[in-house]
Image (spheres, rainbow, N blue to C red):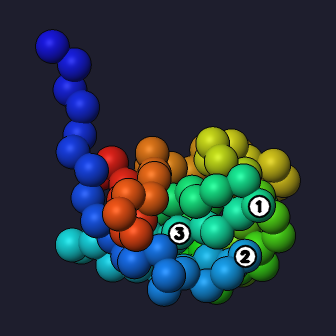
């Protein structure tokens, strides 16, 4: 049997900042929801390098840059794309269902 996490509603899709990052609280976690040209993506909002809130960073298409040290990540898969970031950020499978952004968390 596979351990598949359930889908959780996080925000109405209509409330997302168009082509930008939206900060959402899910329990004790802060989630960054990215409205990209190719769909909706989600990650933990805290940078794994310096602990800064990625929602305050520079965002361009598919790349989020940490506001603290300018390390950057690809929001589609979490991989680091510029130093000093070296470890992938935590990303969540996401979808839009019945007007709600949902993630597996």
C-alpha separation, residue under disc 2 versus residue under disc 1: 7 Å
Residue 52 seen in the current view: no
- Is label 1 in a helix, a strand or a loop? loop
> Disc number at residue 71?
none
Between disc 2 and disc 1, whose residue precedes?
2
Binning the other alpha carbons within 10 Å of mark 3 as few (below 14), some (14 to 19) or many (20 upward) gives many
Location of residue 54 in the rendering, given as x and y in whole percent from the top left corner? 61, 74
Task: Name the one closer to the observer, 94 or 97.
Answer: 97
Residue 54 seen in the current view: yes
- Is label 3 in a helix, a strand or a loop? strand
Residue underneath mark 1: 37
Location of residue 16 in the rendering, given as x and y in whole percent from the top left corner? 54, 81
Q: Viewer-nearest of labels 1 and 3?
A: 1
- Is label 2 in a helix, a strand or a loop? loop
Residue underneath mark 3: 33
Location of residue 36 in the rendering, given as x and y in whole percent from the top left corner? 71, 63
Task: Name the one closer to the observer, 78 or 14.
Answer: 14
Between disc 3 and disc 2, whose residue precedes?
2
Residue 85 appears left or right of 24: right
Cβ atoms at labels 2 and 1 below 8 Å apart: yes
Is 43 drawn above or below residue 16 in the view shown?
A: above
Q: Residue at x 37, y 76 (%)?
A: 11
> Which quadrant of the view contains residue 73?
bottom right
Binning the other alpha carbons within 10 Å of mark 2 as few (below 14), some (14 to 19) or many (20 upward) gives some
Q: Name the residue at the left extreme.
A: 1
Q: Viewer-nearest of labels 3 and 2?
A: 2
Residue underneath mark 2: 19
> Which quadrant of the view contains residue 100?
bottom left
Q: Name the residue at the top extreme.
A: 1
Is 28 drawn above or below residue 72 in the view shown?
A: below
Which part of the image, by quadrant, shows the N terminus?
Answer: top left
């Amino acid at each position: 049997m596979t351990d598949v996490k359930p889908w959780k509603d996080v925000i109405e899709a209509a409330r997302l900042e168009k082509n930008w990052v939206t900060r959402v609280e899910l329990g004790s976690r802060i989630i960054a929801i990215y409205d990209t040209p190719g769909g909706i993506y989600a990650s933990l909002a805290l940078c794994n390098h310096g602990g800064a809130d990625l929602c305050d960073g520079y965002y361009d298409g598919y790349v989020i840059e940490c506001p603290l040290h300018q390390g950057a990540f690809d929001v589609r898969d979490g991989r680091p794309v510029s130093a000093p970031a070296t470890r992938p950020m935590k990303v969540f499978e996401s979808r839009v269902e019945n007007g709600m952004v949902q993630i597996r968390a």
